[in-house]
Amino acid sequence: MAVTDDDRHEDLRTLYGLAIEEYRFQIQLNNQRFQWFTTLDVALLTVGTGLFRLSDKNDGRPLIACVFVVGAVLAAFTAITVARQVEYQHQARSVAKKIAAELGLTEYELGSTPGWERTGGSKRRAWPPKVRWVNYGLLGALGLIHTAGVVYTLAH
């Protein structure tokens, strides 16, 4: 049995719907993962600070420093995970755009975040920053605070 153009078109529409759902899933997964890891990181910061305040001098300080080290490592791990997940999002969007082009839906295809299209040349707007870079900034700040916690804990 030969595949007709109508069958192919219907298959492409089904694939397009699946590609859109995959893109949404990748975004939701990345957002949830970022939220959970950041919440855990802030909890580690809170626990480390609380233990430091409750401890006597040199009593358990190396263990408290380890809590801060784990927090700093978690911040770095979260940044790496978010970066990898963004690659999956871009790949899912690329597949959806390709299917949209096959269907002749380029006017309605998934695009970049509004306002982030390239302007004139090859540069993007510098402000406001992408959400991803704001997230990296937050994770960097958490990593620095944890590192300061390690230094302060071991020095006092």
Image: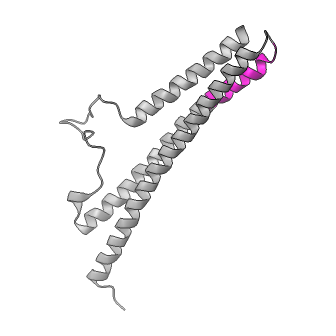
Residue 95 locus on image (x, y percent)? 37, 59
Most prominent secondary structure in the magenta stretch? helix
Using the rendered image of the protein, determine whether residue 81 is visible from the camera's viewpoint.
no
Q: In which quadrant is the N terminus drawn?
A: bottom left
Q: Is 150 drawn above or below residue 108 in the view shown?
A: above
Q: Is residue 40 left or right of residue 111?
A: right
Q: Is residue 55 left or right of residue 45?
A: right
Q: Is 130 drawn above or below residue 3 in the view shown?
A: above
Q: Residue at x 57, y 25 (%)?
A: 143
Q: Is residue 78 magenta?
A: no
Q: Which of the colour schemes (rainbow, by chain, secondary structure, one colour) is used?
A: one colour
Q: Is 144 drawn above or below residue 1 in the view shown?
A: above
Residue 100 locus on image (x, y percent)? 28, 63
When asked about the image quadrant of residue 94, the answer is bottom left
When asked about the image quadrant of residue 2, the answer is bottom left
Q: Residue at x 25, y 41 (%)?
A: 117
Residue 84 locus on image (x, y percent)? 50, 44
Residue 64 locus on image (x, y percent)? 74, 21
Using the rendered image of the protein, determine whether residue 151 is visible from the camera's viewpoint.
yes
Q: Is residue 67 magenta?
A: yes
For the record, the magenta segment spans: 59-73
Q: Residue at x 55, y 35 (%)?
A: 38
What is the total number of numbered labels drawn onto the structure image? 0
- Work out whether residue 58 or residue 12 is closer to the camera in this orientation and state it: 58
- Work out whether residue 152 or residue 1 is closer to the camera in this orientation and state it: 152
Residue at the farthest bottom position: 1
Q: Is 21 drawn above or below residue 50 in the view shown?
A: below
When asked about the image quadrant of residue 119, the answer is top left
Q: In which quadrant is the C terminus drawn?
A: top right
